Amino acid sequence: MNEIKKLDNIKSLDEIIYPEIEPGIISKEMIEYAYLNDGKTGEAARLHKMEPVVYERIFVLRLEFKNILRIDHLWIMPNLTKLSLNCNKIEVIEHIDMLTALKELDLSFNYIERIENIEKLVNLEVLTLFNNLITKIENLDVLEKLVILSLGNNKITSTAGIERFRFLKELRVLNLQGNPIKGSTSFPMDLYVAAILPDVKYYEYKRITDEMRQNGQEKFYRELREIETNEEKEILERSAEAKEEFDAQRLASSFVEHLNEHQLYESLWKGDEDGHALLMIGQVATDLAEEYDHDIYDVTQEIYKFGLECFEEREKEINEFKESLEEGQTQIQKMGHNVIEEFLRQKELIFERASAVLKALELRTLRGEEEDSPESLVLLDLFDKITMEFDDTINDVWQQLMSQELHLHESIEETTVNFQRRIQEMMAKFVEQVQTYFGQLRDIAIHFSENMTEIATHYINTKTAMQDFAGVPPELLHCMEDREAILNVIAGMKDSHIQRIDEREDRLMVRSREFIENMIDELNNDELERNRAKILEINSYLELMSDSLSALQTEIREEILNEET
C-alpha cells in the first residue's frame, strides 16, 4: 500500500513537461509571442520587440513544449522556412500545405500516426518525425529536395515504402532506428538501406561504407532486382505522363487543346443518332464522311499549328516583360541599398557625437551637478541639435527611398499598360485568323450536308421505286413514306454540327479574352501588394532607426553604471 501511495504522488511526464499549460491549438497570439521571444538577448531583444509583427517576414518559428494538440493559423506566414513543433501532443499533420517555402520541419516527439498533407512542401530539405506513432511509410516520394529524413522510434513494421526513396535523389541522411521492422528491431535495416538506396550516404547518422553497401546488395539481391525492375517501369510511365501533361498544358495555353487530332470531327457526331443512321445508307455515304473527316482535320491542323505559333510569340513577349520588370526592380534595389549604406555611415558619425554628449551629461548627473547648470544646458542644446540633424537625415532618406519607390511603381504601371496593349494586339491577330478558320469549318459542314442530301435523296428514291426496304436503317424507315423527313434529318444533322463548331469557337474566344484579363489583373494586384509592402518596409525601418536614438541614452546610462560598479 505504501508503494502504491508513492506511485500516486509521482507526477506524470506531461505534468513535468507542460506545467500549467492547457492543451490547445496554435493561435495568432501564440505565434506572435514565440516570434517576439525567439531567443534574442540584450539590446537586440529590446529592438526586436519594438518591431511590428509582419507575418510575411517571419521565416523561423519555434513552438516547442507548448502542449499543442492541433496545428492551425500557420497560413499567415507564407514565407516560413523553418518550423519546429517538436515535443507537443500533435496527432495529425494538417494545415501546413500552404507553407511551400518551408525547408525544415521538426515534428518529433508527438503522437502522429500517419504521414500526410505534406505533398505540397516541395522545398522541404529536412524532415524530422522521430518518436511518433507512425505505422507506414507513405507520401514522401514527392519531396524531391529532401536531404535529411528521420523516422526513428515509430511503429513502422514493414520495409514497404523505403524503396520509394530512390526517387529522392537529394536524400543523403536517413534514420529508421527503433522501428519494429519485420516484427523485430534486429532486422538489418542498415544493410537494406545501403543496398536499395545508393544515394543515401548516412544511416542512423553513421556513414555507409562500401563494404556495407556490397554486403547489403548480396543479402538483398532478389529484393533489389525486383525494385529496380519496378522502378524502370515507373520511370517510363512518369516520363510519358509528364510529356502528356506538358503537351496538354501547352495546348491549353495555346487555346487549341483537342484540335491536334480528329477530336473536333468526332465530337460533331456525339448524340447525333439520325446523323449516324445516314452514314449507314451505303459506301458512298461512308466515303463522303471520310472526306468530311479529312477536310475538318486539315482545318483543325491549321488552327492547331497557328495556335502554337502564336503561343510561342506570346510567351516570348511575356518573358521579355518579366525580365524588364526584374531589371527595373533590381536597379531600384541597388539604388536603395546605396542610400541605406550612406545613411548608416552618417548614423554612425552622428551616434558617436551623440554618445559623447550623453556620456558627459550622465557623468555630470552622477557627480550630482545640477541639470540646469550652464555646462549641462550647453550639452543639452548640443544634443537637441544632433537630434534635429538625425531627424533631418532620416527625412532625407525617407524622401529618397519613397521617390525611388514611386518612380518604380509608376514605371511598372506604364510598362504593364504597354504590355497589355501589345498582348491584346497579338491576341486580336490570333482571334481574327482563327475566326476565319472556323468559318471554313462551317462551310465544310454545310457542303457535307448538301452532298449528303443528294446521296440520301437518291437512296430514298431508289428504295421507294424498287419497294426494297430491306437494310434500311430503322431511324430512316419513316422517310420512305415522307420524303421531306429526310431533308429534316439532314438539316438537324447540319444544325447540330454547326452548333458544335460554334461552341468550340466561342470557348476559344472566351478563354483568350479571359487569359488577358486574368493576367493583367494578377500583374496589377501583385504590383499593388509589392508597393504596399515596400512602403511599409521603408516606414518601419526608419521608425526603428528613429527610436534607436531615443534608446541611446538608456544604453549610455547602463554602460556608465556598469563601469562604475
Image (cartoon, rainbow, N blue to C red):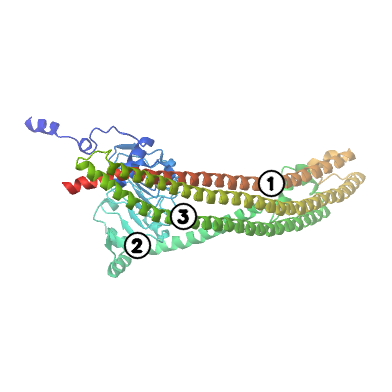
Residue 490 sits in quarter:
top right
Residue 390 locus on image (x, y percent): 40, 47
Residue at (17%, 34%) from the top-left corner?
A: 11
| Picture quadrant where residue 229 is located | bottom left
Instruction: Say what secondary structure mark 2 lies in.
Output: loop
3 or 2: mark nearer the eye: 3
Q: Residues within 10 Å of mark 3 (few under 14, many from 20)?
A: some
Q: Position of residue 542 (x, y in %)?
A: 43, 46
Amino acid of disc 2: Val
Mark 3–mark 2 distance (CA, rounded to whole Å): 47 Å
Residue 41 in sight here: no
Q: Can you name the residue that lies furthest to the right here?
A: 465
- Of 283 and 152, which appears nearest the observer? 152
Q: Which residue is mark 1?
A: 513
**Viewport quadrant of the N terminus:** top left
Report if residue 190 is visible in the image: yes
Q: Which residue is mark 3?
A: 339
Residue 34 position, x and y percent, is: 33, 41
Q: Nearer the viewer, mark 3 or mark 1?
A: 3
Dot 3: what SS?
helix
**Amino acid type of disc 3?**
Val
Q: Amino acid at mark 1?
A: Arg
> Residue most toward the left?
2
N-terminal of the pair, mark 1 or mark 2, is 2
Using the image, determine if residue 20 lies above or below residue 121.
above
Say the numbered circle drawn on residue 200: 2
Question: Which of the two discs, 3 and 2, labels the residue nearer the N terminus?
Answer: 2
| Camera-side mark, 1 or 2 | 1
Residues at discs 3 and 1 in contact (Cβ within 8 Å): no
